[in-house]
Structures are given as structure tokens and as C-alpha cells.
Amino acid sequence: MSGVAALGCVLLAGGTVNSAQAADETPSGILQAGAEQAVADGYPGVIGLTRSGDTTEYVHAGVGDVGTKTAADPKAKFRIGSNTKAFTAAVLLQLEGEGKLSLDDSVAKWLPDAVDANGYDGSEITLRELLNHTSSLPDYFTDLGVQSDYFLNLTPDAAYQPQQLVDVALSQHAPQSAPGEKFGYANTNYILAGMVIKAVTGNEPGEEIEKRIIEPLGLNDTSFPTDSAMSGNYLRGYAYTDVIGRRDVTRSNVQIGGSAGAIISTLDDMATFQRALMDGKLLAPQQLKELTTTVPTSSADETWGLGIAHMKTPCGTWAWGHNGAVLGYFSEWLISDDGSTQVVHANNEYHMQAPTKGQTDSYQAMGDAFCAA
């Protein structure tokens, strides 16, 4: 997504990264070099892992806490931003597999009055169109991101109701395309997806994610928080501007992300979830097929499924992945069709602006590491 990069978005513009790697370079070695380069570019810390079959290797560079100079720990927690969306999509797919809803249901069937303003009509938008970002809905974060207290981190515990966020989106402008007509990344889609989960189950989306994904997979370092606190072993998060300099934004608002971007996790837990998502452990065959049925975007090197993207790698193969861009943290991942090959990495500085050199260099290293696996 061009412009504001909020709570995760289209993986870095430009699609394929062209960089040949020497035949003797290992995936972890490539990712380690990328982490070190990103720290040289200015990031406080970078962590990552590569996984092939049952073999996992970790990388790290820089610090997890600028004040104490503690080394960045690849086992530490961090905010995963829009990588939350794959969790939310998985719950809706599970509910469909259980016969409790259909992804071809309209939004209005479950949320009669949620999308009914400024020319938008929830009866014309399907749940599938929410999950693959073809709903035509604007992104509420355009108004609440860099132009708000969120960017300045002035109100880390301010309360945001999901419908309030949807209303902000609907007020921005009238529809610019028909539902299903074109791809347009919007966090609004996944706020509504979370509202549907509650309408169907009676539970908050975080509760269903906990019950259906976090607990069964043993993701002991993953949580869906409702306040700004972090606990245990975690990376401190930072933002940077030329005027203010670097500032600690570890405690930041999560209700503004909700089912679109609230989750806290680790590299290991993310990798476990991603593999379970792709290898059929979480989804029945029909729902796995729906997960990986994609729609085109403006790039020939990228299409989008349900909560995940399909991307062309530097070596010309394709992989699944997503990213999470949230104040203070940026993470992204790639995984093969069968889940056997994975690369995940994260850093602890993100300031809601266009891609930095550190972001671009670490993205390239991720792609090159995946290709070397």
C-alpha cells in the first residue's frame, strides 16, 4: 500500500527483489547478514529465523533495549501488527467449515447496520471480499494513523469501539469502485471480520483466536491484548522522526488495531502458526483452498488470498506471506506452499512512514534467504 503504512499492508512495493546469492551461502547466513545491514542502516535491533523441515536457525543483530543495550533476543515478544489478519481469517474459515457461516454471506446478514452510510451497503459486500480486500471500503487508519494521537503515542490506552473505527472509514469518501471489482488494502475489512466473529459466536474475536488457534497450537508467547501493557521477555519498540529523534513507543494503543492488528507474538509462535495454517492442521481442505485462492493487485508479482499474500521471490518462485507494520515494530514472513520452508524476521523500530533503507534491505535478505533454502 502506498502512502501511510498502517498496521501492515501490501508487502514492500516493487515486488521481486533482484539479488543473486552465492551458492554456498546458507539461509540463516543470508538472513544474519541482512539483520546486520539493517542495524547498520539505523535499526536498533533485528531478529529472525529460518526453518526447513524440523531444523530452525535463529539470527539477531543490534539491541532489544536502547537504554540497557541488551542484545536483541530472537525469542523475545513483539507486536505483530497486521500479521494478526491471518489469525482472524483462519477463525472465519473455521466457522465456515463448521457450517456456521458462508464466506459468500453478506456483511449485512451478520451486521445489519454496520455498513450503511455514504453510499456503502453491507448487503452488497461479502465476507470473502472483506478477507481478500476487494470490499471497496476505505481504510480508517488513513485518518487515525500519522495524523493522530496514535502516531505521537499520546493516548496508548484510549478506547476504540470497532463500529467507531468503521464509521471513521465510511465517512472518508463515497465508494470509488464496486465490491469485488478491485483490490484495495484496508484495515477496516478486518475490523468488520472481527465483528462478524462476535456476531456468529457471541465471543470477542480475541477469545475465539485464543480458543481456536493459540491454545491448540501451544502458542504460549502469543496473546491478543486489549491494553497497552507488555510483559515477560519482549523487544522495546521505537519510533523515529528527524524533529523528535528516537522515542520509546513500546506501550502503544492496541484497540485501534483490534482484529486487524493487535496480537503480540514471537518468531517461533508465528512460524508455528504459519505452518499449521498452510499444512492443513488448522483448516479443512475446502477452507485451505479458499485461503489460497487469490485476487490480482496492481503488481504482476503479487496477488492476495484471505489474510495472506502470494508473492514472487527473488529467484522467480512464489511464496506466501504478509507483514505487520505497527508503531514501534515491523515484521514479515515467507512460507512455501506446504509450510516446510519458512523465513520470519522482525525489527523494533517503525514510525508509520514510507519504507526505510533498513526495511528494504531486510526485506531483500528475507527473500534471498527463502530462495537459498
Image (cartoon, rainbow, N blue to C red):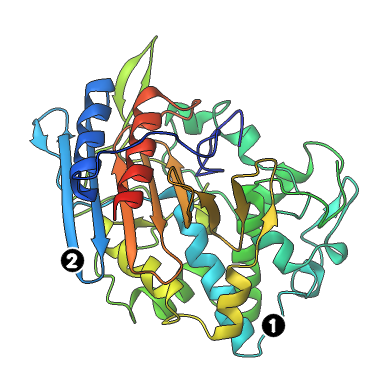
Amino acid type of the residue tagged 1 in the rendering? Leu
- For the N terminus, give its image quadrant: top right
Q: Can the viewer see residue 99?
A: yes
Q: Dividing the picture into quarters, in which one does residue 243 lie?
A: top left
Mark 1 neighbour class, 10 Å CA radius: few under 14, some 14 to 19, many 20 or more: some
Give 359 or 226, whichever is nearer the viewer.
359
Which residue is painted at 65% across and 46% down in the image? Answer: 185
Q: Are marks 2 and 1 in contact (CB under 8 Å)?
A: no
Q: Dividing the picture into quarters, in which one does residue 210 lie?
A: bottom left
Q: CA distance from mark 2 to mark 1?
A: 38 Å
Residue identified by numbered label 1: 101
Mark 2 neighbour class, 10 Å CA radius: few under 14, some 14 to 19, many 20 or more: few
Amino acid type of the residue tagged 2 in the rendering? Thr
- For the C terminus, give its image quadrant: bottom left
Q: Which mark is residue 361?
A: none
- The tally of labels here is 2
Disc 1, SS: loop
Direction from residue 52 to residue 19 in the image, left or right: right
Q: Which mark is residue 55?
A: 2
Which residue is painted at 24% across and 49% down in the image? Answer: 27
Direction from residue 334 to residue 372 in the image, left or right: left
Give 287 or 138, whichever is nearer the viewer.
287
Mark 1 or mark 2, which is nearer the start of the sequence?
2
Q: Can the viewer see residue 198?
A: no
Measured as percent of width and height from the top left, residue 264 is found at 34, 55
Q: Is residue 262 above or below residue 357?
A: below
Measured as percent of width and height from the top left, residue 209 is found at 45, 72
Which residue is painted at 17% across and 46% down in the image? Answer: 59
Report the mark closest to the observer, 2 or 1: 2
Q: Dividing the picture into quarters, in which one does residue 245 lie?
A: top left
Direction from residue 61 to residue 356 in the image, left or right: right
Measured as percent of width and height from the top left, residue 30 is found at 23, 41
